[in-house]
Image: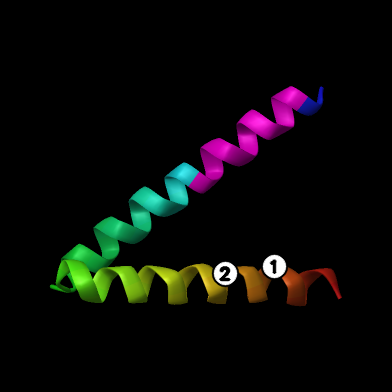
Amino acid sequence: MLSTHKDEILGFIREFEISSREYLKSKGLSENEMTNAYLELQWDFLHTILKQQS
């Protein structure tokens, strides 16, 4: 059961990464800018999750 949830979570993270990179590319960011912007998206996403739990 845990393995199934782990696979779902990893799949979600992969989809988040792919869609985030596509979004940032569509905005015309350079590879260097995308690295920082992607980290910011991850940070914002984590804060959103944490806010929903409180």
Q: Position of residue 9 (x, y in %)?
A: 63, 40
> Dot 1: few (<14), some (14–19), or many (≥20) neighbours within 10 Å?
few
Measuring 53% from the left and 36% from the top, which residue is drawn there? 11
Measuring 21% from the left and 72% from the top, which residue is drawn there? 32
Give the quarter of the image for residue 27: bottom left
- Image quadrant containing the C terminus: bottom right
Measuring 25% from the left and 57% from the top, which residue is drawn there? 22
Residue that numbered label 1 is attached to = 49
Give the quarter of the image for residue 12: top right
Q: Position of residue 33 (x, y in %)?
A: 23, 76
**How many labels, in total?**
2
Q: Is residue 7 left or right of residue 23?
A: right
- Callout 2, which amino acid? Phe
Mark identifier at residue 10: none
Residues marked 1 and 2 touching at CB (< 8 Å): yes
Measure the C-alpha gap from mark 1 to mark 2. Answer: 6 Å
Q: In front here: 41 or 32? A: 32
* 9 drawn magenta: yes
- Image quadrant containing the N terminus: top right
Measuring 63% from the left and 69% from the top, which residue is drawn there? 46
**Could you tell me what secondary structure mostly forms the magenta stretch?**
helix
Q: Is residue 32 left or right of residue 7?
A: left
Q: Secondary structure at mark 2?
A: helix
Span shown in magenta = 3-13
Q: Position of residue 7 (x, y in %)?
A: 62, 29
Q: Secondary structure at mark 1?
A: helix
* 27 drawn magenta: no
Residue that numbered label 2 is attached to = 45
